[in-house]
Amino acid sequence: MDTAPAPSARAAYRGRFAPTPSGPLHLGSLVTALASYLAARHAGGSWLLRIDDIDGPRCRPEHADTILKQLELHGLHWDETVRYQSRHELDYQAAFEQLHKQGLCYRCICTRAQLAEISPAGIDGPVYPGICRDAAHQQADSAWRFRLPDGRIMLDDQLHGRIERDLVDDIGDFVIRRADGRYGYQLASVVDEQQQGITDLVRGADLIGSSLRQKYLMQHFGIPVPNFLHIPVLLDSKGYKLSKQNHATPINASSAAQNLIRGLDLLGQAPFAADWHGRVDEILMRAVRNWNPALIPKRLNLPG
């Protein structure tokens, strides 16, 4: 069961934005960055930047550089040094070894193609059916999964309220080290949040399943669990998620003020005239002052 103790004192707000450098930012990722930035600045806190480049084949340094420039041109300036996941594999290795010594993970030889055919659909995506749980595989080139116990887990979200899932039926055992030796997103993110001292996570609602997995790991490691705000995923005019995989158009940094106004409008924040050409810093100053997550719509759709 979910038994995380309540923190005795509220730490100073520390938020972050963590893009994957598999391409430039598009409008959907800018909206997420903007929401995260406004929440942190409204609280008088810090806003950090992490580059999630642990997945080597999909990530390129030039994309990371482009993302940094896009954020700067939109006035979204971060505090402290940028954290690159690719430079912290020893930290992830230490966390993995701790779980391995505790007997909490097992080898999995299932391929993605196999899992696509047999994994049942869960509330937050496919659920691993436990094929390799008790197989005791010894192949050196296998992935490692974290073994979840029976029980339930919940988190309180600032927009969605209480979210609760069954650990086995809705979440399922998840990969913490891949067959190629790279560490899994869930494990790496938990280590990152701890080392950056993150107190508040503002991210897309498509990551609710990840948040639940990461919360369980945080509780296991004794890491303070952050507050959560999952904003709706931005959908295009056909109802598809705006994403790099769906070939979303990169934002044009030369239209930074207009991009910010558009993002604020999608987030339901203080209205701006569509033809107002104020400076980026003026827009952000007003937006920080008026930030109200209760105004975020339940769905974010681009007009047809």
Image (spheres, rainbow, N blue to C red):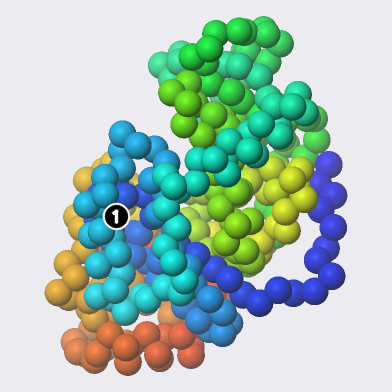
- Element under disc 1: helix
Left or right: 73, with 18 as reference point: left
The part of the image, by quadrant, that contains residue 276 is bottom left
Q: Which residue is pictured at 35% across the width and 59% down the height?
A: 29
Q: Which residue is pictured at 53% across the width and 76% down the height?
A: 46
Please state which of residues 220 and 32 is positioned toward the viewer in this rendering: 220
The part of the image, by quadrant, that contains residue 59 is top left
- Quadrant containing the C terminus in the rendered view: bottom left
| Residue of label 1 | 64
Amino acid tagged 1: Ala
- Quadrant containing the N terminus in the rendered view: top right
Q: Is residue 106 visible?
A: yes
Please state which of residues 123 and 181 is positioned toward the viewer in this rendering: 181
Please state which of residues 18 and 88 is positioned toward the viewer in this rendering: 88
Vertical placement of residue 281 versus 28, above or below: below
Q: Which residue is pictured at 35% across the width and 37% down the height?
A: 56
Vertical placement of residue 268 versus 290, above or below: above
Question: Residue 180 location in percent, x, y?
Answer: 43, 23
